Amino acid sequence: MPAAVVELPDAVIRAAALRKHYFASAGLPALLRGRWRGRRIAALQGVDLVVRRGEIVGLLGPNGAGKSTLLKLVAGLLLPDEGELEVLGRPVARFGDALRRHVSYVSADERSFSWRISGQQNLEFFAALHGLHGSAMTERVRSALARVELEGDADRAVREYSSGTRQRLAFARALLGDPEIFLFDEPTRGVDPRRASELRRFVRERLLQGRTAVVATHDLTEVQQLCTRVVTIEQGKIVGGGGPEDAARLLGL
């Protein structure tokens, strides 16, 4: 029987029985024997999840639990092997390129910026990919830089940015499409604790402003400082949930 997506009028993300598998890379001996794929790995095993409008949901779990895979499915970067997934009441597979106008994915491993040009020039490039040109581009880039408080660094080359400043530039890029949903994959990884705390406050108070977000993290502090609800995931399965105050208990701490 096909998975049934739960009907909830205020749900902006709805998943039912999501499954996703990968094949590990084959080692050299296997390649020499003509085997191109390694063992089959279950990244997600029947995930059910509902995210309501305005929530900041923390997806908490260890590395390899399936957090990034789930975010990439919601962002349309991957397709599920089984199950159903809707964003804003519509199956993700039917959005095509239009999905990026509604959903923005921000990763800690940001590698798409050109380090040789300025932050503003980078944003102008990505704004053009969103179909913005002329005065519309100028205004959207200006607004994004202001929202993330980067006006003073806009003309500097990205190679001169600190890790925290580069992450704020990634947040600015996420704003270019004026999305309704943000997906953050380990948003403060590699940032020192003080700056990480500042970034979390900044995300909640300046960036989201009542919008919906899912935050994938293994950092208990991140969930407690940023999220309104927490869901725990282990070995590709949702295993618990509650308020941010419940995060330590859910992890067995």
Image (cartoon, rainbow, N blue to C red):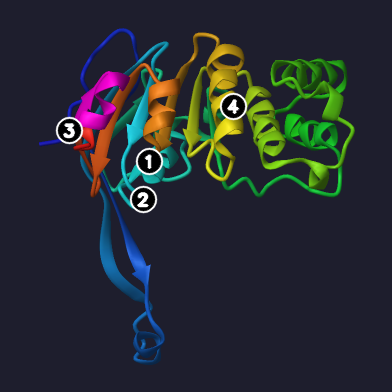
Residue visible at 33% across and 36% down? Answer: 60
Which mark sits nearer the N-terminus, 1 or 4? 4
Badge 1 element? loop
* Corner quadrant of residue 178: top right
Q: Position of residue 30 (x, y in %)?
A: 34, 86
The residue that label 2 is drawn on is 63
What is the CA distance from the residue labelled 2 to the residue labelled 3?
27 Å
Which mark sits nearer the N-terminus, 1 or 3? 3
The residue that label 4 is drawn on is 199
Which mark sits nearer the N-terminus, 2 or 3? 3
Contact between marks 3 and 4 (CB within 8 A): the answer is no
Q: Is residue 83 left or right of residue 136?
A: left
The residue that label 3 is drawn on is 3
Amino acid type for the residue under numbered disc 4: Leu
Q: Where does the C terminus fall, quadrant-wise?
A: top left
The residue that label 1 is drawn on is 218
Question: Neighbour class for label 4 at 10 Å: few (<14), some, many (≥20)?
Answer: many
- Is residue 83 visible to us here? no
